[in-house]
Amino acid sequence: MPTKSSHHKQRLQKTQARLNDALERLRKGRPIHPLHRHGYTLTVAALAREAGVARNAIYTNHRAIIDDLHAIIGDPMKPMTTWQDKLDELHGLIRTMKQEQRRLISENALLLQRALAAEAEADRHQRHNARLIAERDTALRAVSIDPSHKRTALRDDTTEN
């Protein structure tokens, strides 16, 4: 009867074999998992899915396969950034955004000034147009001629002779 530790070793060996086979299939571009048929990124999660193994098992018992995976994709592990680095980066982003905000406020003020000037100009043109229309209407209005006025003017002209 196999002992508990030998059973554990056999299980680790089977898992390692499944991981190696899955890594080779992914590397060659021939995955068998249905989610990988239409494309995938070579990651620990994709490897775990392809092998049918939990990611936790890979991180806990099979660290060497992670190194193999990184060697294949050529992506060395990036050094972890510190909180201070992240804080400095965010402070820089805040400064940049404040500068952009000031620029946009200035631009908005200029555009508002131009819009108000354009509205005033449009109002002035509208008033001028209304005056011109009123003058035109006055000039085109029919003037009635009073016949008595005309005769009087004619009589005055005839009496002078």
Image: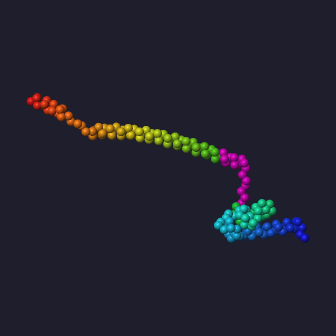
Q: Residue at x 41, y 41 (%)?
A: 122
- Residue 42 point in image, percent of width and height: 69, 64
Whether the magenta-drawn stretch holds residue 111 is answered as: no
Q: Residue at x 49, y 42 (%)?
A: 111
User: Is the N terminus in the top left, top right, bottom left or bottom right quadrant?
Assistant: bottom right
State the colouring used for the structure image. rainbow
Residue drawn at (18%, 32%) of the image:
149
In this picture, is 90 found above or below 65?
above
Q: Position of residue 41 (x, y in %)?
A: 68, 63
Marks counted in the figure total 0
The magenta segment is: 76-91
Identity of the residue drawn at 86% across and 67% down: 7
- Between 78 and 12, the one lying in front of the other is 12
Residue 22 vertical placement versus 142 (above, below): below
Give left or right: position of 145 versus 13. Answer: left
Q: Quadrant of residue 132?
A: top left
Please provide percent x and percent y for residue 65. 76, 65
Q: From the viewer's perspective, is 156 left or right of 106? A: left
